[in-house]
Image (cartoon, grey):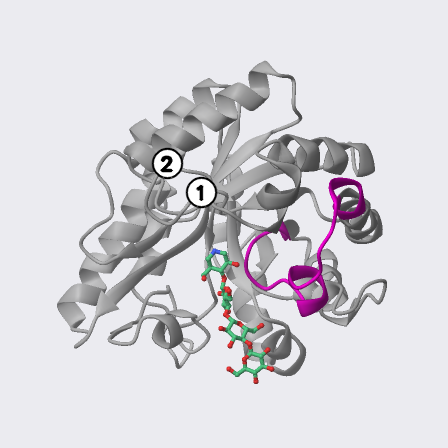
Amino acid sequence: PGELPALASSRGIELGVAVAVDPLRDDPAYRDLVADHYTSVTAENTMKWEHVQPERGRFDWSGPDTVVDFAVENGLDVRGHTLLWHNQQPAWLSEGSYDADGLRAIMREHMEALLGRYQGRVSSWDVINEPFVDDGPELRGNLWLDTLSEDYIAQALTMAHEVDPEAELYINEFNVEGPGPKADALYALASDLLERGVPLHGVGLQGHFVHGTVPDDLARNMARFSDLGLDVEISELDVRIPEPVTEAAVAEQGEEYRRVVEACLEVERCSGVTVWGVTDAHSWIPEWFPGHDAALPFDPSYRPKPALNGMAEALGRR
Ligand code: G3I
């Protein structure tokens, strides 16, 4: 193995990576990169609702099993991603119309199947993904909010805790890494849930950054969640570079990865940093942000970039 897993463990944090099922099955070099450099994995897509339960009552475990079996074989933790999200829902779910009891029954069936199957092997779950609108403090309208009211968040966390009392339950969100109205709204939501005794254990700040805009006050913002008694994780880190991608920008990106890991280490209850993809050949960025690329710590030929070194330096490599 490389040096990162031992360094991360010695500093008490996870260093994770999002994985895709096809290369995990077909590409030994991809598997080696994951096993050699990380301590945990997140399924980039295959544990999402549309993949797990494409038709009501029909579950497809082939992808999730591939990820979890790989993790167990290699001694890696698994972050479960994700239960309630407005994207990647199957048509039967998003196009159906339900009353509150009907929707709660669907939620319970899904959680019992998914959390039940991986109980003890998946240590944490993103129960709620992206509950706020893209750039503001309002809750996002979605199937769950529209049917169950704003209380859907508390209901889902409570239900997930009943189904798997050992799992760490997270709310995961983007555009909340630095302080601002949306981060304040997440903080207020988390505080309110904790005051009400709702089983919330952590918040994931996704960390999809643009090169040059990694916030300076990341650690300060993370610390206030930690001070609430919550775990806090950078859950989907990538740093996309506007094209043309220069060697200088890639070197600076290495410093940005270093700063993000350093921020985590400064925060008492930061549980880890997860990078959103294994190599630049597997990243979601070119498809979703044309004109940006090279967001991850390995290049398309699987060679390490300065970002990998930046993370090792942050973790105190001597
Ligand atoms: O499965 C189809 C395949 O059959 C088809 O041939 C192919 C052709 O384009 O598309 C495949 O679907 C792709 C899917 O990932 C794979 O399951 C979609 O095109 C692609 O758009 C989809 O993107 C994913 C995205 O979530 C969808 O919402 C990204 O890979 C994934 O990285 C991204 O992850 C999200 C997190 O879950 C939540 N936070 C934001 C993050 C980035 O959007």
The image shows residue 273, relative to residue 285, as above or below, that is: above
Provide the secondary structure element on which disc 1 rests: loop
Q: Quadrant of the C terminus?
A: top left
Q: Position of residue 209 (x, y in %)?
A: 30, 54
Q: Is residue 69 left or right of residue 81?
A: right
Residue at horizontal 52 percent and vertical 68 percent from the top = 33
Packing grade of label 1 (10 A; few <14, some 14-19, many >=20) is many
Q: Position of residue 21 (x, y in %)?
A: 64, 73
Residue at horizontal 74 percent and vertical 56 percent from the top = 72
Q: Is residue 209 visible?
A: yes
Q: Is residue 271 left or right of residue 21?
A: left
Q: Quadrant of the N terminus?
A: bottom right
Earlier-in-chain disc, 1 versus 2: 1
Q: Which residues are magenta?
A: 81-103
Question: Contact, CB < 8 Å: mark 1 with mark 2?
Answer: yes
Q: Position of residue 310 (x, y in %)?
A: 30, 53
Distance of label 1 from label 2 (alpha carbons): 6 Å
Q: Which label number is shown at residue 132?
A: 1
Task: Determine which residue is flagged by label 2.
Answer: 137
